[in-house]
């Protein structure tokens, strides 16, 4: 994976987004640009136009819905011990101006879809494994994910790797959101 991939000669006409809550990055893809079988399994309500994907430590997601809920033990375990991961998936009826827009071609969109799809743990029938934990709002759910979270593989590194594999210029290694956002077009 190259940090500064060569420009692809394909026509970039698909828009995806990256957003940050100030610490954690999510990848947002229009529903019509996602694999249909994944959209069906996610089962969002009618009118959902965008779906965001954030990868991270499962215990952190479950026990830290607000930053004020953060406990040292949860943060320590997430950073320094092998831990299970989850995908936090949220549906949106519209886009927001704070999202960073990235334009990609069909080939890159296929790579991104594949990266996201392979991040889910699936059963022998190919179904994704959700788990019964209340989301942060009414339009989000959690699913078991592949990989182990650590100080060397954070939520932002997952996003950074997705961008690299998709052929988008980004950081060499970025455990923090600003390292990834620095390379993306600013919406201002």
Image: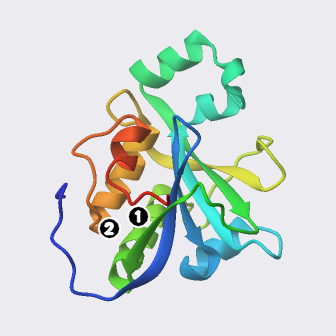
- Badge 1 marks a residue whose secondary structure is helix
Vertical relation: 6 (above or below) 79: below
Camera-nearest residue between 51 and 146: 51
Tell me, for residue 166, which label it has, or none: 2
Q: Would you say residue 125 is visible in this rendering?
A: no
Q: Nearer the viewer, residue 118 or 167?
A: 167
Q: Observer-nearest residue: 68 or 110? A: 68
Residue 174 falls in which quadrant of the image? top left
Residue 7, position in %: x, y?
19, 75
- Figure quadrant of residue 154: top left
Position in image of residue 95 (x %, y %): 66, 66
Q: In the rendering, at what x and y percent does residue 23 appear?
A: 51, 34
Marks 1 and 2, how far apart at CA? 9 Å
The 10 Å Cα crowd at callout 2, few under 14, some 14 to 19, many 20 or more, is: many
**Tag shown at residue 89:** none
Asked if the residue at tag 2 contacts the one at tag 1, i.e. Cβ–Cβ closer than 8 Å, the answer is yes
- Where is mark 1, residue-wise? 115
The mark nearer the N terminus, 1 or 2, is 1
Say which element carries label 2: helix
Considering the image in quadrants, where does the N terminus appear?
Answer: bottom left
């Amino acid at each position: 994976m190259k940090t500064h991939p060569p420009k692809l000669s394909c026509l970039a006409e698909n828009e995806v987004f990256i957003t940050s809550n100030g610490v954690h990055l999510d990848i947002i893809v229009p529903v019509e640009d996602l694999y249909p079988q994944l959209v069906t399994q996610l089962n969002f309500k009618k009118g959902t136009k965008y779906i965001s994907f954030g990868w991270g430590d499962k215990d952190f997601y479950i026990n830290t819905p607000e930053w004020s809920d953060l406990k040292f033990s949860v943060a320590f375990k997430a950073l320094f011990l092998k831990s299970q991961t989850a995908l936090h998936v949220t549906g949106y009826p519209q886009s927001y101006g704070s999202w960073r827009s990235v334009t990609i071609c069909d080939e890159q969109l296929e790579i991104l879809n594949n990266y996201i799809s392979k991040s889910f743990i699936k059963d022998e029938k190919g179904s994704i494994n959700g788990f019964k934990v209340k989301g942060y709002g009414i339009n989000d759910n959690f699913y078991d994910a592949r990989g182990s979270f650590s100080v060397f593989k954070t939520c932002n590194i997952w996003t950074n790797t997705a961008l690299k594999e998709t052929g988008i210029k980004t950081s060499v290694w970025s455990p923090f959101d600003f390292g990834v956002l620095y390379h993306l077009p600013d919406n201002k």
